[in-house]
Image: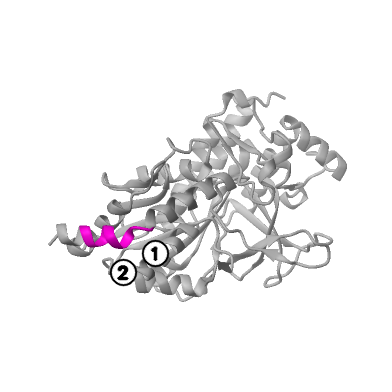
């Protein structure tokens, strides 16, 4: 069997994955998911040598797997040890680092070919439309992150460029350069939005917003963004960041920016998994649904929560390790066993921390940065804190000039 990117096998597989995504968020075709997953397993078993060896130790091959649950999920650490690509990496369209949060000295690389890029763009564009911009075609977006030109090896920068192109107006822009955060542009844009009544979208890492809120509180700055404005923070908000709880974070969004909690959407992105996981709150609010905040599980993914000791499946509500199966992972491996701790809800899941790998106990640690790599996180945090020191002076200067 020919499993190259040019083969009919891979071309048809990509067409079927894309078709499955395009069936939308109400797709409940379990048989279709299972058929695609088994074909994807066949491809990855025969093209990724470290994965084939891992499956051999598990005693599972494509002929023996009859259901997606039979397919071995690799530990996320495998991406730091091996090249986990189902194609020749010389043909990679994207190549960027995993987060390296657990072990920053052993960051892996994620490779995606042209077809895989098409899949990830289709999946995450659909999700962004449904969960961040369900009520508007385009709006001005301020990205409190580096651009792909500044951080070409970082997945979050590549992903947000797609968001800017698909959903942003021409004025949408990145706010972080090598010289730091453009505080003047940020404040001027917020004040202009207040005056014009045009809603504004602020997108960035959770820590970045926390730094901004602390700086505003220090200078007693308060804003009132127009109705329809929204805040989207990425990287996973896990319990605490510094002294700010999740509830306090939402309160700061309301008090400092004038953005209510239902317009605050968190997205969890991981380099090893192609699909992003969005909060349900904004879409549910606009549809008049009253449900608890949770991460949505798109139809082309599956989630299992497993025990930290024996990896047995856990029931809804019990905390364990999150295992994801993602059809969009065609260029890597379908199943990934993460070291993220969380629990399934009736409608999705929540993430609460990262397992510190102490047997018999959870002992979670929070993830204190965006999923963009520790080096980038340190750099961005440094630029943010340095730039925000003068936020009061800059605000007063802008206010005088705009009178």
Residue 319 is at least partly visible in this image = yes
Residue at image coords 54%, 55%: 235
Q: Position of residue 113 (x, y in %)?
A: 56, 31
Left or right of residue 55: residue 393: left
Relative depth, front residue between 300 and 226: 226
Q: Which residue is mark 1?
A: 215
Label 2: element kind = loop
Left or right of residue 212: residue 119: right
* Chosen colour scheme: one colour
Label 1: element kind = helix
Q: Which mark is residue 357?
A: none
Where, quadrant-wise, is the C terminus in this rendering? bottom left
Q: Position of residue 178 (x, y in %)?
A: 41, 41
Residue at image coords 83%, 43%: 60
Left or right of residue 360: residue 139: left
Measure the C-alpha gap from mark 1 to mark 2.
8 Å
Q: Are marks 1 and 2 in contact (CB under 8 Å)?
A: yes
Q: Which residue is mark 2?
A: 221
Q: Position of residue 129 (x, y in %)?
A: 40, 53
Residue 75 vertical position relative to residue 199 in the rendered view, above or below: above
Residue 190 is at least partly visible in this image = no
Label 1 or label 2, whichever comes before in sequence order: 1
Magenta stretch, main secondary structure class: helix
Count residues near mark 1 (Cα–Cα under 10 Å), then give few for <14, some for 14-19, many for 20+.
some
Numbered range of the magenta stretch: 389-397
Where, quadrant-wise, is the N terminus in this rendering? top right
Q: Does the magenta segment cover residue 395?
A: yes
Task: Report the label total.
Answer: 2
Q: Position of residue 23 (x, y in %)?
A: 49, 50
Residue at image coords 77%, 58%: 357
């Amino acid at each position: 069997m020919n499993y190259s990117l040019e083969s009919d096998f891979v071309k048809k597989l990509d067409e079927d994955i894309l078709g499955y995504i395009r069936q939308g968020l109400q797709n409940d075709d379990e048989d279709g998911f299972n058929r695609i997953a088994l074909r994807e397993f066949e491809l990855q078993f025969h093209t990724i040598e470290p994965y084939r060896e891992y499956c051999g130790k598990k005693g599972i091959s494509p002929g023996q797997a009859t259901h997606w649950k039979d397919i071995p999920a690799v530990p996320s650490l495998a991406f730091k040890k091996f090249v986990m690509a189902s194609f020749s990496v010389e043909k990679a369209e994207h190549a960027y680092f995993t987060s390296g949060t657990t072990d920053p000295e052993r960051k892996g690389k994620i490779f995606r070919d042209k077809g895989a890029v098409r899949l990830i763009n289709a999946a995450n564009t659909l999700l962004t439309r449904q969960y961040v911009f369900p009520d508007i075609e385009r709006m001005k977006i301020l990205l409190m992150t580096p651009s792909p030109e500044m951080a070409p090896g970082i997945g979050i920068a590549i992903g947000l460029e797609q968001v800017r192109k698909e959903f942003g107006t021409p004025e949408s822009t990145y706010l972080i350069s090598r010289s730091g955060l453009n505080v003047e542009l940020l404040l001027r844009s917020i004040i202009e939005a207040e005056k014009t009544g045009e809603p504004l979208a602020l997108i960035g890492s959770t820590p970045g917003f926390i730094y901004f809120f602390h700086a505003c509180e220090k200078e007693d700055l308060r804003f009132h963004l127009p109705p329809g404005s929204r805040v989207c923070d990425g990287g996973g908000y896990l319990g605490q960041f510094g002294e700010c709880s999740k509830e306090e974070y939402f309160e700061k969004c309301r008090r400092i920016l004038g953005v209510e909690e239902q317009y605050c959407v968190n997205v969890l992105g991981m380099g090893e998994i192609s699909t992003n996981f969005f909060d349900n709150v904004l879409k549910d609010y606009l549809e008049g649904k009253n449900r608890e905040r949770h991460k949505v599980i798109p139809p082309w993914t599956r989630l299992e929560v497993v025990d930290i000791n024996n990896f047995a499946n856990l029931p809804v509500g019990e905390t364990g390790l999150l295992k994801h199966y993602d059809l969009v992972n065609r260029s890597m491996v379908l199943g990934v066993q993460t070291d993220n701790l969380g629990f399934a809800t009736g409608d999705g899941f929540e993430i609460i921390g990262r397992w510190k790998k102490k047997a018999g106990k959870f002992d979670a640690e929070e993830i204190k940065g965006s999923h963009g790599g520790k080096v980038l996180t340190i750099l961005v945090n440094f630029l943010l804190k340095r730039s925000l020191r003068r936020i009061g002076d800059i605000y007063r200067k802008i206010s005088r000039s705009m009178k």
